[in-house]
Image (tube, rainbow, N blue to C red):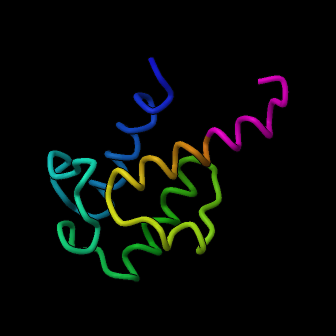
Amino acid sequence: MSAVAETEPRVRSVVAIHLDVDPDRLLPGARLGEDLCVDSLAAVELAMVLEDEFDIALPEEVLGCVRTFGDVVSLVQARVEKRNRAADPQV
């Protein structure tokens, strides 16, 4: 199973629970603001929840580029991979 295939369901679950939305609405192209009604406060809170869940850091400068649920999954996956490489330089 690919790393994205393992990460996406966890991200979907966390986002669905935190935003109180049906997981079926969390398609890759679902826009956070327009489709999922995520305002700036909800976005910051969601970032904090994802940081805790995945033990990663999501700096403000990268969060500004996140527009869709697919962007969230990609960002979390990239940060998880970066964390794993730092923890095991042989990978």
Above-or-below relation of 14 to 65: above
Q: Residue at x 42, y 55 (%)?
A: 72
Q: Is residue 85 magenta?
A: yes
Expressed as whole percent of the image width and height from the top left, the position of residue 51 reads 57, 57
Above-or-below relation of 38 to 41: above
Q: Which of the two residues, 28 or 87, is positioned nearer the viewer here?
A: 28
Above-or-below relation of 62 to 88: below
Expressed as whole percent of the image width and height from the top left, the position of residue 31 reads 25, 64
Q: Residue at x 40, y 28 (%)?
A: 5
Expressed as whole percent of the image width and height from the top left, the position of residue 75 reads 51, 52
Expressed as whole percent of the image width and height from the top left, the position of residue 73 reads 42, 48
Instruction: Name the magenta segment's main secondary structure.
Output: helix
Q: Quadrant of the C terminus?
A: top right
Q: Which of the two residues, 25 or 28, is positioned nearer the viewer here?
A: 28
**Residue lying furthest top in this view?**
1
Q: Quadrant of the N terminus?
A: top left
Q: Is residue 44 left or right of residue 20?
A: right
**Residue lying furthest bottom in this view?**
40
Q: Is residue 5 left or right of residue 33?
A: right
Q: Is residue 51 magenta?
A: no
Figure disc tally: 0
**Residue lying furthest right in this view?**
89
Q: Is residue 76 left or right of residue 24?
A: right
Q: Quadrant of residue 82?
A: top right
Which region shows up in magenta?
Answer: 81-91
Q: Quadrant of residue 59?
A: bottom right
Q: Residue at x 26, y 74 (%)?
A: 33
Q: Residue at x 81, y 30 (%)?
A: 88
